Amino acid sequence: MKHAISTVQSRVLDKVTRETLAIDDLLLMEKASLRLWDLFRTLIEKEQPNNFIFVCGKGDNGGDGLAVARHAWSSGVEKARMQVVVPQGQEAKGESFQRQLASLKGIGIAIQTWEYGCLENYVSQKSGKTAIIDAVLGTGASGKARGTALAMIDGINSLTEKLGKEHAVVIAIDIPSGLGDSWMKDFPIVRADYTLTLAPAKIALFFP
């Protein structure tokens, strides 16, 4: 029988893993992102998107999204088909996020700082189906989304509603942004078509 855990327990598990195995945050993120990429690749084969938008928050979930974007490029996804969106204010982001971002810049992936309408602007220049990767908030977030994170969540949902199911697929990294242990029905969350989560699963994924 498989067990699900809370987002708080997930954070504790990450901490224990780092301490027990004596590995740092970046190495743990790299190992996790490789497993996420394995799952992501099967969805690419199924959905056949033409374009990819990685919408990344400033924390570890955003860092996971950046790492998956790098794995996509390493596996042959052309840079011209990819757009990475991050919050403004680089100094506010974590070290692992910063290093993942520097890696993407080093290989020439286009980085767009978040502003209203930026997702629609990118899609308007492309044709075919777009995969929107939600890496805004992860298990480290609590309460109702606010600020730039809230704007990103609304932006993802607005774009997918505008494009329709035939032209957009939303893939959440670990947990749909805005969802968590304290989630309530009036909390905005990304309406993901798929969620790529690493075992054990999070209890919040089974909320109605």
Image (spheres, rainbow, N blue to C red):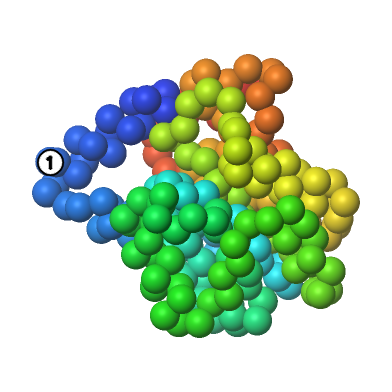
Q: Residue at x 59, y 42 (%)?
A: 149
Q: Please indicate, yes or no, whether residue 170 appears anywhere in the rendered image.
A: yes
Residue 54 falls in image quadrant:
bottom right
Residue 193 falls in image quadrant:
top right
The type of residue carrying mark 1 is Thr
Residue 66 drawn at (x, y percent): 47, 62
Q: Tell me: 109 left or right of 119.
A: left
Residue 26 drawn at (x, y percent): 28, 57
**Which quadrant: the C terminus?**
top right
Q: Tell me: 36 left or right of 46.
A: left
Q: Rate crowding at label 1 as few (under 14), some (14 to 19) or many (20 or more) other CA atoms within 10 Å.
A: few
Q: Image height check: is 159 above or below 11?
A: below
Q: Tell me: 24 left or right of 43.
A: left
Q: Residue at x 73, y 41 (%)?
A: 154
Residue underneath mark 1: 20
**Which quadrant: the N terminus?**
top left
Q: Please indicate, yes or no, whether residue 194 appears anywhere in the rendered image.
A: no
Q: Residue at x 60, y 38 (%)?
A: 147
Q: Image height check: is 40 above or below 108?
A: above
Q: Residue at x 54, y 56 (%)?
A: 88
Residue 69 drawn at (x, y percent): 51, 66
Residue 67 falls in image quadrant:
bottom left
Q: Depth check: 197 or 52 in front?
A: 52
Label 1 sits on a secondary structure element that is helix
